[in-house]
Amino acid sequence: MKTKSLYPYYLIWPALFIYCIFFVLPALIGLFYSFTDWRLDRETLKFIGLDNFQQIFSDKTLVLALKNTFIFAIVTVIGKNVLGIALAIGLNMRLKSKNLLRAIFYSPSILSVLVISIVFTPMLRTDGTINKFLEAIGLGVIGQSWLTDPTIVIWTVALVSIWQHTGFQMAIYLAGLQSISKEYYEAATIDGAGAWSTFSKITLPLLLPAININLMLTLIGGLKVFSEVFVLTGGGPGNASQVVGTIILRSFGEGSWGMGTAINTLLFAAVTVISIPLLIFMRRKEVAE
Amino acid sequence: MNHKMKKAATGVIASLLALSLAACGSNSNSPAGTATNGGSGSSGSKVTLELAISKSSQDSAFVAQDLLDAFEKETNIKVNLQLLPAEQTATVLQTKLAVDETPDIIQYNLASAVTDLNLERNFEILDSEPWVSRLLNKDVLSANDHVYSFHVSQDTGMQGVVYNKDMFKELNLSIPTTFEEFLAVCEAIKASGVTPVFMPFKDNWAANIWPGAAFADYAAKNDPTLFDDLNSNKKKWTDIPEFAALLDQQYQVFKKGYTNPDILSDSYDMAVGKFLDKEVAMMFMGDWLIENVAEKDPSIHLGLFAIPSSKDASLGASPLGGQLFIPKKAKHMAEAKKFLEFIATKEQAQKMVDAQGYVSNFNDVTTPKLPDYKQEIVDNYITPKKTVLTTDAHMLVDRSELYRNLQDQFAGAKTPEEVLSAWNDKFAQLMKDKGVAGF
């Protein structure tokens, strides 16, 4: 009877050790602190059970931040993936300039979010480039105070995020498309299938692994959003664009460290509860196809 | 045997990796070692003091290179600056103090140090330092009857309406003393084609200049124990309808079209340029703005008058800013105290007071001839005792949520009453979290 070698498993030890020290351990310590009144101005810690979590849901700003976080996550998941697939299909065709176009569409995703802030903040002013352009083409009526109107600010930040990251999603979809054998398309052509049938019966099912990866990446990224909001609006005007990430920063700024870790724990739980069932569901679909 | 060797080798590699990781951590986590050896490499005995300061305070007189060089030359002690991001100065310092990675000296604001940094727990009492006996005004450096901070000046930042005196002269306008007069002045300036008031409320703290002075003026005139009552929960912020009226005044200036149109997109760093280009005539701000404009163009004459929220209002006086503090856990306590002693010497303090136009806080250091705008403030407000400590000085908690609520008012999301109600709730929660009696 042949014994299975354990050798490859030993190689995992260093990585596992690093992972435990820098992720698992801090996460467990954070979980402990979320049940305490850990504050800048307290000498000692007191275990306060679920008080922090009760206080979280009585804070109107945090409820608004949760709503904003979900709006941002849903809008960016849909935007980045629909546009990403569309761009990938377009740039998977026989175009002379496809390499140049791929580079152009991918380039925003390698820019720092600070650069995005420097570029977009003046463009999105009430008297900024975007409104002036809309006015010049006769669409001045749809001009907005993009970053200072509380009713639309989170949507604006989501659109900027879609603009920046769609190229990255496109690259993953392109890789997925290129792994689909051309024979399927040739057979479909012989059978007289139309463009929609080819897309829905061949491309989409075989692209499911890439869709799965992109959905998870965009969803988790959307729920954990911080940098885009922080650099473009700082959570403002007022609290209009606060998301869970900026509220965590606010709590630490106020010296309420126990509360900050409690909100972080809640975010971790929300991301886990939403993403794991989705992952399982998508994996099953993959197998079924 | 072969399998055992592989196992052993893997174990050794894993241990080495872990050790190297621990070594990296240890190295990056040793400011004490760095500080002891300073930048002198092999000299061994040279001490380097770590002075933490916000990036926005880089022009502080305490960190001028010639001062630091002179200190190093005399004492062989080097001062290394830790520049902290302006928006996160409080958070970074809180973290450093919490994890005992304390700098040797910190530049901060005394009133904010009480609320943000737990002054009593974290900072050294300086009562017995040799320079304290020479102070003219201990109060501006003290909290709870102890001197906790250092400065050569006793000037506090004055807050009111910064205005272009030349424009007022050209339009034959006089300084308004009531809100109605102020609106009339705005109308006249607007008619001349200039924006009357610049509101850079992208920086939410800027929206607090008007209420900060106006609330304090109201309390001083009508209810001197008001802030004590608010701090002990005997009164609530929503109990004072006059506060809502004062918030509405500032909003009216915006609603009547006397400001820059995109106030929530414009930030404070644009202010100097707006005055230099003569695009605006006034701004609710502190006298530091006048100094910043004068540095760029001394030919522009700016002045300061009190926020005209009520008849003959007092000028807002903010708590003295930019003092130096020594953390209790400073790694080089003696050397840090020596640095303060050095700046406090008659020679160094006089240099600093002369260069900055400070009102000296030492009995043997002479106050130089003050700039015109400052002399006017002294003559019109300080000497006749028409100043009032701004509301911020009376609040024991982080004020950022109040500032955000003020921003909400200008975004059209809250009425003045809703601003006060939201702040009342947050204030109570922060005071409760802080463990203040009565909440």
Image (cartoon, helix red, strand yellow):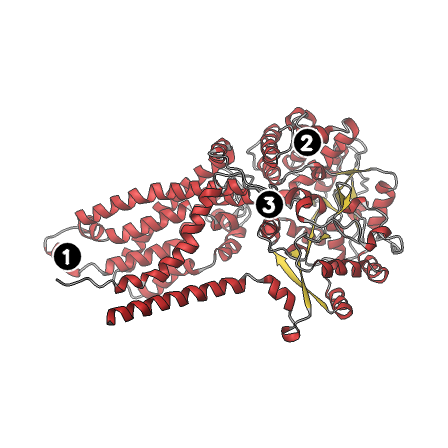
Q: Are marks 3 and 1 in contact (CB under 8 Å)?
A: no
Which image quadrant for residue A187?
bottom left
Give x and y (percent) for residue B337: 75, 58
* Placement of B32 over or under A70, stated as above or below: below
Q: Earlier in the sequence, mark 3 or mark 2?
A: 3
Q: The disc labelled 3 sits on which kind of residue?
A: Lys
Res B158 seen here = no
Mark 3 vs mark 1, CA separation in Å: 56 Å
Q: Which chain is mark 2 on?
A: B
Q: Which mark is residue B202?
A: 3
Mark 2 vs mark 1, CA separation in Å: 75 Å
Q: Secondary structure at mark 3?
A: loop
Mark 1 lies on residue = A184
Q: Is residue A41 left or right of residue A104?
A: right
Q: Report the residue at 39% width, 54% height from top.
A: A20
Q: Is residue B346 left or right of residue A58?
A: right
Q: The disc labelled 1 sits on which kind of residue?
A: Tyr
